[in-house]
Image (spheres, rainbow, N blue to C red):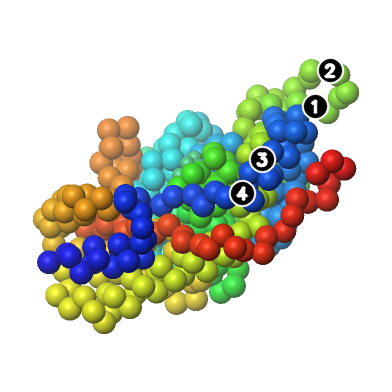
Amino acid sequence: MYDELFDLIKSIYANQSSIVLHEPILTEHDKLYLNDVIDSGFVSSVGQYVTQFEKKLSSITGAKETVAVVNGTSALHLALKAVGVSHEDEVITQSLTFVATANSIAYCGASPVFIDVDNHTLGMSYSSLKHWLENKCKNTSKGLINRTTGRRVAACLPMHTFGNSCEIENIASLCREFQLPLIEDAAEAMGSYYKQQHLGTFGDIGVVSFNGNKVITTGGGGALLFNDKSLAESVRHLSTTAKVPHPYQYSHDQIGFNYRMPNLNAALGCAQLDKLDALLASKRRVFKSYHDFFNTKFRSKPMSLIEPVKYCQSNHWLNAVIVEQASKVKNLIELASEQNIMLRPAWQPMHSLPMFKHADRDDLTVTSDLASRLVNLPSSAVINEQLNLPKLPEFMSGN
Ligand SMILES: Cc1ncc(COP(=O)(O)O)c(C=O)c1O
């Protein structure tokens, strides 16, 4: 019954003996940048590529300032610390997410509180958040307090699932109303926009990831997007062991982190950003192939494709289907595997993991249902390498 779908996937990724969920596109152009940084000798924490990468990210996303770090997880950790999340606090987030979202809250000694997601966005539900804030929390002189646990609610951390936008505009205005710091986990959303505004720029801080499975990669890497330059400066300081600038003395004014992105990774990031538009265009074509197939050809309808919501220009990081019956998911994934096609279920929800099973939560009916029926499809970009890409930036190549 799934043969039509498997044939489509094989036609999109023609000539690939094994089709994975998402692979990086690495070319001669990337090698040019990497060779350049190796020749320069500045492979580690000093070097101009980090600054260049941050500038490019700010210009693409519209963020006022960007800080590049070693991965998306460390970016989330720093973001939460920067808005003041501390021991015994709570952070409202979603259970349908990658474990890094909840882990980063735990790194601060705080507890996640899980509220439900929407069927259409797969991200945090605005109405569930509103209901939670209005009914389960109270405003006190110490700030917003969870009436049940008595803990301070220190931030809200929604996630943009698979590159599609959650109801970020409404969530942002609700957070403003409750004076709740908003951090967007936009790890999967590099190149995604809502009403022309890049995801990750609606709240206090947004986080993107450049892990090898993302739209662009730096090997491992992440970045924080800021609208407030002074907040960015304090995070940059924290990410470099809080070292006080001095020509030779080692002095640190607080407990910092060794989270700064190395120059080597940033060079790869600059090369990858040169082809971001081409990658996004290709991913749009892959999505369109799935869209046409599910809307016109795949008549038996055992599953339906997740489509981006209105006003969202998605990067289509991972295309996903909702299988009609949860009991069919295992069989679908195994049949695909026999044909060397990788399909994957969504994450096990955070509230079902041993370390978060005692976390406070709202009704999670949609989360549990989606987690049992969501399946990701192969979504890598397919690009023709004859792209007219820029040469090395002027500040390098022997200058
Ligand atoms: C939703 C989400 N948050 C956070 C991360 C963490 O990013 P990294 O792997 O760069 O640490 C990822 C992915 O990797 C993710 O998908």
Amino acid at pointer 3: Leu
Q: Earlier in the sequence, mark 4 or mark 2?
A: 4
Residues at circles 4 and 2 in contact by the CB criterion of under 8 Å = no
**Residue highlighted by disc 2:** 249
Amino acid at pointer 4: Glu
Q: Is residue 290 left or right of residue 329?
A: right
Q: Is residue 9 left or right of residue 186?
A: left
At 29% from the left and 75% from the top, the residue drawn is: 293
Residue 244 — which label?
A: 1
**Residue highlighted by disc 3:** 34
Amino acid at pointer 1: Val
As helix, strand or loop, the secondary structure at mark 1 comes to loop
As helix, strand or loop, the secondary structure at mark 2 comes to loop
At 55% from the left and 52% from the top, the residue drawn is: 216
Q: Nearer the viewer, mark 4 or mark 3?
A: 4
Q: Is residue 97 visible?
A: yes
Residue 28 — which label?
A: 4
Real-space Cα separation, disc 2 to disc 1, in angstroms: 9 Å
**Position in image of residue 320 (x %, y %):** 32, 62
